[in-house]
Image: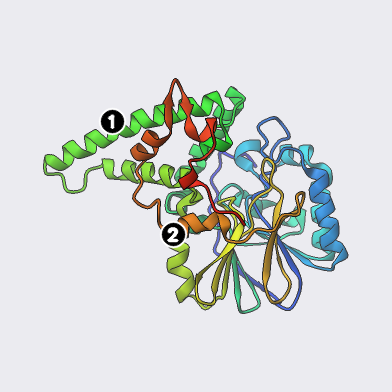
Amino acid sequence: MFSWARPTPLEVTRKIRGDQRVYLVSDLHLGDGTRSDAFLGKDKELIRFLDRVRDEGAHLVIAGDAIDFHQAFAMNRVIKAHARLIGELSRLAETNGVTYLWGNHDYDISLFKDMLRFDVCSSLEIGDEVLVQHGYQYDPFIGPNLDQTHIATVVHHLVERVLDSWIRLPLENFYTLANRIAFWTFHKFALAWGAAHHLLLRAGVSDPPTAKTQAAIHYWTQNELGDPGCMVQYIQAFLPTSPYKYLVCGHSHLPGQMEVAPGRTYVNTGSWTFNSAQYALWDGERFTVRDWIRDREYGDAAYRPILSGRFSHMSFDAWWRENYLGWLRFRAGEVGRLPSLSPPGP
């Protein structure tokens, strides 16, 4: 299956027992094994993790984006690069069971569910208290524009492959020359569109076409300020009025859990990209989120700045003035995040 095709994901909900141990991972982003494969060859570590799931008789949930079709282009390239790992996942599906939720990078997976023996769905209920989704549903940019972002993501991966460099957010984590040039270029783009937006408003255009671009600029800014995918405000609106005590997502790659309302908790499984190897565990009563390699537990530390609302007023231009040091140098990459932008300790 070639990645330029755009299958439409179905709305399918599954339910499993809540009185069992359930391990949850997401955003493995298994690619073609080249330098642009963000999984970075942690196959042996993930197989060790699968061994634990098998030994404990637990169920495995993969909450989307395990296969990165946008990077690899075709399933056979992923299988060739990660043959043993794919085999272990398939065997675990036969013994313990694997529930797979498609994400925005891999909704093609529904075409391969029989080969992999996964139970594929869009949403999963664990008992009556837990809802699991990939999370792109709460992303205001990708969620309503899945088809449009599909091609954009393929192009993004092609650019990274050609330049042999990461071009991603946040800048301090991917402080490459190509990424710094991308930020410089985006700033000039934002200035130009901001001026056009202002002129159209002054000309009496109440809803200028530049408004969508301004929304994209805001999306970029919030991703840089610690709210990847701008998901939190939409989760805060959904979870308190839902019948669930827990909402579990991936997508943002930001591991942890936070209480968004009394008795309502958001859990993010993190990712297995780059140096991360995060997972969530449901023990039948509560969740823990940990890193498999570093054995670090995650609470709400990364989410406290978002919950405080201290960055809600900051524009991309304000971020630029705080960070740009000239000559393609940025404070965020040269000396680390500004103290005001650093998440508190665990």
Q: Secondary structure at mark 2?
A: helix
Residue at image coords 33%, 41%: 213
Residue 192 circle label: 1
Q: How many numbered callouts? A: 2
**In which quarter of the view is residue 298 placed?**
bottom right
First in sequence: mark 2 or mark 1? 1
Q: How is the image coloured?
A: rainbow
Q: Secondary structure at mark 1?
A: helix
Whether residue 103 is situated above or below residue 41 in the rendered picture:
below
Q: Please identify the quadrant where the C terminus is shown.
A: bottom right
Residue 306 circle label: none
In this picture, residue 78 sits left or right of residue 137: right
Circle 2 residue:
308
Whether residue 118 is situated above or below residue 29 in the rendered picture:
below
For the residue pair 225 and 46, the one nearer the viewer reads as: 225
Q: Amino acid at mark 2?
A: Ser
Q: Please identify the quadrant where the N terminus is shown.
A: top right
Q: Position of residue 163 (x, y in %)?
A: 58, 23
For the residue pair 229 and 148, the one nearer the viewer reads as: 229
Q: Residues within 10 Å of mark 2 (few under 14, many from 20)?
A: few
Q: Position of residue 341 (x, y in %)?
A: 48, 46
